[in-house]
Amino acid sequence: MKIEKIQIGNKKVMPFTIPSGIVMTEVSCAEKLLREIPEIGIWSTKSTGLNERVMPTEELLLNNSLGLEFGCREPILVKIGDGTYANAVKLINDGAIKTREKIERASIPKDRVILTSVFAEKESKLVEIVRVLEPVADAFEWNGGCPHGEKIGMAQGQDPRVVYSFIKTITDVSKKPVFFKAPANVTGECVKAAVDAGAYGVAGINTVPVEPLDEEGKYLLWNKKGGKSGRGIKEIGLEKVREMRKAGGDITLIVMAGISTARDIEDYAEAASGGPIVYGIGSATAGMDDKELSNYFRTIVEDVRNGTNNAEGLLKKVDMTRRKVRIRKITNQNCDFKIYETDISLNSLPGQFVFAGISEIGEKPFSVMDDDPLTLGVLSRGIFTKQFNSLREGDSFYIKGPYGKGVDVPENSDVVLAGGGCGIAGVYFLAKSLSKKSNLLTLLAAKDREHIPYLDLFKKYGEVEIATENGSIGRKGLITDIMRNLRLKNGSYFFNCGPKAMVNAVLPLELEVSIPERIYSSADYMTRCGVGIDGSCANEKGRRTCVEGPFINAE
């Protein structure tokens, strides 16, 4: 089977994309991966509305004076079968203006198509969105397929009259190619309506509606309703692609739903034969870091061309199993920063993290403070952590993981650990592990003595310096005040864990005595899925911290 470039508008590109809302949801991540993966010819952006849509925090739920639209809280992604997932994000996005500004600042390769995905409740809003994004878009995709968007997405895309109206709205405003993102229940009538309205092509199918439950009959997703993706919907995808081709004629089809191997591509090529085809690969990328992702796309193209099946061996065995654990001991019971010791041990590497959750309440990622027994540090900050910190000894919660990469250093290295606030929990396991093979200096900073747990244990593993904002222990001040008054050894390894402001403040001081390759930081980026699919944890350099980190070096 041949893999050849196809024409979309005025560009000829490789026929692969990662569907909208997966992996490259942050512009910084798209910029990085598009440079590194030439096989991805089309960047399908995160679906964008006119206004920003955000995750509902406690503060916003109490006072939404700006009238912001809300998406979903965690859990947003669960595994429900072999290579099969359910997700519910509900179209969280930056809004049209901010999205355009981010794309304008980015260096997206000129030989790729920017397929800008958009959604709106009304045609009038869609006009505004298209006009804002027109300068940065090579083509548009109208999202008529999201199964949990409420009055948008599937609610619109299953009605031929609405499909015609919304596609016609875009084609009247823009002369760039327009695609209809089709729902899982798309009909030939809807495809024909899109074509009649001037659609260049159809992308589909979107995820299949699902409401996954756990073994106790409780909802696994915060939103309850979600969309099923991956291997478990391939047969539905093939059936609908045949229907899309029959109704749409020789239009361009962007086919997706369960593609992970060359055989899947061949099956879709047969189902969609009769016109140009682009292949969308999404759920199959779960758990892959950037190098693995690049290798996977290169390999699957080689498989299709050579009749081999090597890409299948590159798929990650993603473990998203929920395990019930019981709280054996709580330290700092009267503080808002509590330490939870559980009744299990976990085979974890220093630097990794887990998700801790309460069924039908939510979940959040936490550093593994210790793995024998599994110990977590939880600071009350928002809706979930406040609820979590109401648990008592003997109560239960669930965990998923561990996730992320562990850290290590060569024998007899000089190592400095810098932990600030709840980041202290993130460096304790490093101190316990790295002290066995290195010369360790630990710097801890918090607002007061009460927020520095395990101090006596930290002192067992090496020298400790402390700063508190109120001066209740150690130096009065910040962690940078400690650093400026120490003679840090040249060539030391540094591991920073804490708020972004702390990490940004210590980096210049560390770079005075070491090199970027020896400086690693774990800042509080929003990690929502743990396996790289959501992409919202991407940092300024485009690295998804859940699969590349959480400790990312300063290169």
Image: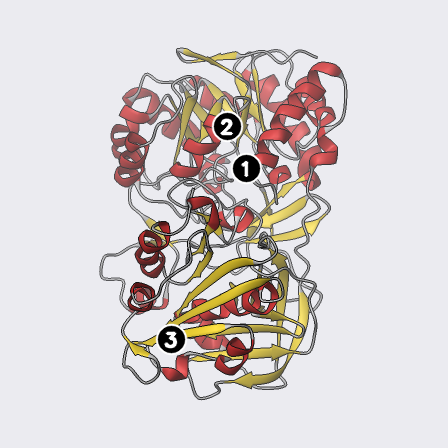
Q: Secondary structure at mark 3?
A: strand
- Residue ID for mark 1: 290
Distance of label 2 from label 1 (alpha carbons)? 8 Å
Picture quarter with the N terminus: top right
Q: Earlier in the sequence, mark 2 or mark 1?
A: 2
Query: Percent from the top left, x then y, of residue 142?
Result: 41, 31
Q: Is residue 331 above or below residue 59?
A: below
C-alpha span from label 3 to label 2: 42 Å
Element type at mark 1: helix
x, y (%) of residue 536?
44, 47
Q: Looking at the picture, which amino acid does disc 3 mark?
A: Ile
Of labels 3 and 1, earlier in sequence is 1
Q: Is the residue 524 above or below the residue 4 in the image?
A: below
The residue nearer to you, when weighing 511 against 540, is 511
Question: Which mark's residue is nearer the viewer, 3 or 1?
Answer: 3
Q: Amino acid at mark 1?
A: Asp
Circle on res. 335: none
Q: Where does label 3 land, which residue?
A: 466
| Quadrant including the C terminus | top left
| Residue 280 rendering spot, x and y as whole percentages | 57, 29
Residue at which label 2 appears:
36
Color encoding of the figure: secondary structure
Front position in the image: 132 or 424: 424
The quadrant where residue 249 appears: top right
